[in-house]
Amino acid sequence: MKAIVVTGPGEGLAGMRLAERPDPRPAINDVLVEVRAAGWVSTELDWPSTWTDRAGRDKTPSIPGHELAGVVTALGYGTTGLSVGQRVLGLADWHRDGTLAQYVAIESRNLAPLPGDVDFAVAASLPISGLTAWQGLFQHGRLEAGQTVLAHGAAGAVGTMVTQLAREAGAYVIGTGRAADREKALEFGAHAFVDLDADALEDVGPVDLVFDVVGGDVQRRSAGLVKPGGTLVSVVGPVETEPAGGRAVDFVVEADRVQLGEIVQRVRDGRLRTNIGVTASLDDAVAALTATARRRGKTVITVGS
């Protein structure tokens, strides 16, 4: 099969190429999926799991990518809950070969059914961004109606999901980013916007929940904005400065079939819009994934027909 491979952390993006790889075989409780579209996160090459398996053994050349939408073509021994020919979307295991390929073997529990009226490219943009937003807001942030959310990176793939889901839940959402991000952040539902280069973040006032995808100085300053009993949620690693009287949570997104189903249903009925910035074919993927321009939304690679 054709796949995008990366050769080692030392080469980084320079070691990315389109190559022929053996077709994967589904293990116990796996399914084999013919990939129709795959999502890409630009920080993947910084993750140790891209280069090693769970035992810490080198697995290069690796196939990156963890989000997918496609069709089940085979079932591993003992697999239940899915069937051959079924449309699915999901989040692949961090330590296994990924989804930037024509086929991927993946645990069935990491997949959810994909309705026929949702496009494969749209579906492939949802797992990491949608589940990160959902879990950060509702599982870890314990968001309630009437609260105020400070959403950093509000024009990005995760930030636009955070904004929409928080607003639907009855929260007041303040988005942040650069000046060029203002229009998109407001378009996706932010009630207000803070330009981190020009506006005083401290003027935002107390908030119930900070959703941080930036880290560094922005995160440290944000800790002082959290109300007593509030939460700072980070997806960029451990929180350096905890909010006084509040909680700090950092987490890694996990696959969840029920939550994915909730997210897909919102897309179907128009309550949730995707934020796809770049779409390219598998043959053109290397150029798209190694581009140095700032990414405005999700990068999706289409595979097959």
Image (cartoon, rainbow, N blue to C red):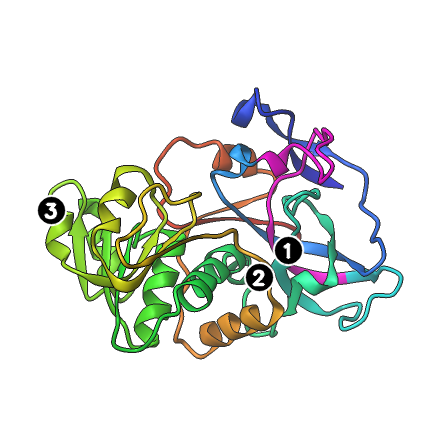
Query: Residue 65's x, y, as percent?
Result: 59, 44
The amino acid type of the residue labelled 3 equals Asp
Q: Are marks 2 and 3 in contact (CB under 8 Å)?
A: no
Residue extending farthest to the front is 245
The amino acid type of the residue labelled 2 equals Phe
Residue on which disc 3 sits: 199
Work out whether mark 2 precedes mark 1 in sequence or the reverse, and give the earlier one: 1
Judging from the image, what secondary structure is the residue with disc 2 in?
helix
Q: Which mark is residue 70?
A: none
85 w.r.t. 193: above or below: below
Mark 1, Cα crowd under 10 Å, few <14 / some 14-19 / many 20+, is many
Disc 3 from disc 1: Cα separation: 42 Å
Residue on which disc 1 sits: 36
Judging from the image, what secondary structure is the residue with disc 1 in?
strand
51 in the magenta segment: yes
At x 55% / y 57%, what residue is drawn?
124
Q: Quadrant of the N terminus?
A: top right
At x 55% / y 36%, what residue is drawn?
47
Q: Taking the image as drawn, is residue 177 in sight?
A: no
Disc 2 from disc 3: Cα separation: 39 Å
Residue on which disc 2 sits: 120
Highlighted range, magenta: 48-72
